[in-house]
Image: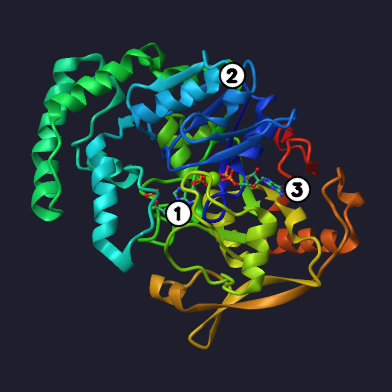
């Protein structure tokens, strides 16, 4: 039995979709445990077909795998239907997708409030994906949320939507000067949508617990990343859930003792979408170089990703807060053709060296990177399939990343395809 959590170690978009797909054939279950359709996970199948998944686990693309949308996820029913429809059209078997009865729903008022509140914040905006994620999690914690199981009882659903709208309409109308929404219409729409996926609602906690008992293999697919975690990230420029490893237990219903390993997905450089501090950000031609060479454009919103050099302070932090044992270092190929490759090893904060994350968020805002220059390589490495085939300087770069991050690099991505991976250690074998 193995239960592996797969975590983004930076600010998201590290290549979690590709990594999930790589291990998909060797697991029985793939589980999303937090976030919602703010995520955009890209998978490129061996035949070249490219998929972008937002809500449905990336394991859906591997025949025979059971997929779970866990209790910790927030689900927009309309998006779920569109995504299922898109997969059906491309002949992907979606019959083994199960949805937790306890997952919360993203309602139209969550999306409306997400959008207007960001507009209202102006320059101080978080830069959210505008998908209603934050407002849906706010309602969950405020005990005002609507859950998947409410779709099974129209009168309870109507009561809950009416109670929530009582407050939401006041916010929309009185604070944001927008039109209020109609409870009856919302209820009718979601009930109609639910007809298409009601049969998938199940006690996923029980299913996963039984799977563990039978000795099956489970992969918990994180979305977003460590620095976007509401507790451990660069608050308030974060998402509203816990992508970190602790969140995997809460959001799936598997006890922490079931988890056998934590794999961090780490990009060979750093990117971020939306607002917030980013010490190694490059606003010059090198930032543009990484964006262009790495194709750094958001899968969900189409926004250009901010780019910068590798930040080892962040990686070390991610190792610690997630208990990461192994890393999948992605996009090493993007760094080919550079004379030197800088690595941020520590920060200078107001004249003082910090080898670890500064105590306060203000400190992090003031952090400027202290770089170490690694010699670059010019060879195209996208065809390398073993560590020894990599140019000596690329090997040295990986070794230095490993040393600074304090966890072993077990896989290296040299291109978007499943086979464009160098496996150094088999993480599923332990
Ligand atoms: P996720 O949100 O963590 O799943 O990552 P995204 O899918 O948003 O962004 C990662 C992008 O990098 C996708 O376009 C992937 O196809 C691509 N990708 C993943 N691994 C590699 C790699 O090793 N090399 C290259 N060149 N691209 C990669
Ligand atoms: P994947 O799973 C990168 C960012 C948004 C914004 C902040 C809050 O593909 O790695 P939200 O809509 O969640 O309230 O936005 O979080 N963000 C992501 N950035 N990858 C993601 O997902 C993200 N999901 C949210 O850009 O800064
Ligand atoms: Mg993404």
Residue in the image at 27% along x and 45% along y: 135
Q: Quadrant of residue 191?
A: top left
Binning the other alpha carbons within 10 Å of mark 2 as few (below 14), some (14 to 19) or many (20 upward) gives some
Residue in the image at 76% along x and 64% along y: 400
Q: Is mark 2 in CB contact (under 8 Å) with mark 3?
A: no
Q: Is residue 268 visible?
A: no
Q: Quadrant of the C terminus?
A: top right
Q: Position of residue 282 (x, y in %)?
A: 59, 71
Vertical placement of 345 versus 189: above or below? Answer: below
Residue under numbered circle 3: 412
Binning the other alpha carbons within 10 Å of mark 3 as few (below 14), some (14 to 19) or many (20 upward) gives many
Left or right, 264 with reference to 127: right
Left or right, 352 with reference to 334: left
Mark carried by residue 302: none
Residue under numbered circle 2: 92
Dot 3 falls on a residue whose secondary structure is strand
Number of marks drawn: 3
Binning the other alpha carbons within 10 Å of mark 1 as few (below 14), some (14 to 19) or many (20 upward) gives many
Q: Quadrant of the N terminus?
A: top right
**Inter-mark Cα distance, 2 to 3:** 28 Å
Q: Earlier in the sequence, mark 2 or mark 3?
A: 2
| Label 1 beta carbon less than 8 Å to ligand 2 | yes
Residue under numbered circle 1: 228
């Amino acid at each position: 039995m193995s239960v592996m959590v797969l975590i983004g170690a930076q600010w998201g978009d590290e290549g979690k979709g590709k990594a999930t797909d790589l291990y998909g054939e060797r697991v029985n279950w793939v589980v999303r445990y937090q976030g919602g359709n703010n995520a955009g996970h890209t998978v490129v199948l061996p035949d070249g077909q490219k998929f972008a998944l937002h809500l449905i686990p990336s394991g859906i693309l591997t025949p025979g795998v059971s997929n779970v949308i866990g209790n910790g996820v927030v689900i927009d029913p309309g998006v779920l239907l569109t995504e299922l429809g898109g997969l059906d059209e491309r002949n992907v078997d979606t019959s083994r997708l199960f949805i937790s009865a306890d997952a919360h729903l993203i309602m139209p008022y969550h999306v409306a409030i997400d959008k207007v509140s960001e507009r209202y914040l102006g320059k101080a905006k978080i830069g959210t994906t505008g998908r209603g994620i934050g407002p849906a999690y706010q309602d969950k914690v405020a005990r005002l949320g609507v859950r998947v199981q409410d779709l099974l009882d129209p009168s309870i659903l109507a009561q809950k939507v009416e109670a929530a709208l009582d407050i939401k309409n006041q916010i929309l109308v009185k604070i944001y000067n927008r039109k209020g929404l109609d409870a009856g219409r919302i209820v009718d729409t979601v009930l109609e949508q639910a007809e298409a996926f009601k049969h998938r609602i199940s006690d996923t906690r029980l299913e996963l617990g039984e799977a563990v008992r039978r000795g099956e293999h489970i992969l918990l697919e994180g979305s977003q990343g460590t620095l976007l975690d509401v507790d451990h990230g660069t608050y308030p420029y974060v998402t509203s859930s816990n992508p970190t490893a602790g969140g995997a237990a809460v959001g799936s219903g598997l006890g922490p003792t079931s988890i056998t390993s934590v794999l961090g997905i780490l990009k060979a450089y750093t990117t971020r979408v939306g607002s917030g501090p980013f010490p190694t950000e490059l606003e010059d031609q090198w930032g543009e170089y990484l964006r262009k060479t790495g194709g750094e454009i958001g899968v969900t919103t189409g926004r250009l990703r901010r780019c910068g050099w590798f930040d080892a302070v962040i990686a070390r932090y991610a190792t610690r807060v997630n208990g990461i044992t192994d890393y999948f270092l992605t996009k090493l190929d993007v760094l080919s053709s550079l004379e030197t490759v800088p690595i941020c090893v520590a920060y200078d904060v107001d004249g003082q060296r910090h080898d670890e994350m500064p105590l306060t968020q203000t400190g992090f805002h003031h952090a400027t990177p202290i770089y170490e220059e690694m010699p670059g390589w010019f060879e195209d490495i996208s065809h390398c399939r073993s560590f020894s085939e990599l140019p000596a300087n690329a090997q040295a770069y990986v070794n230095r990343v490993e040393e600074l991050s304090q966890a072993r690099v077990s896989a290296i991505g040299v291109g978007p395809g499943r086979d464009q991976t160098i496996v150094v250690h088999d993480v599923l074998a332990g």
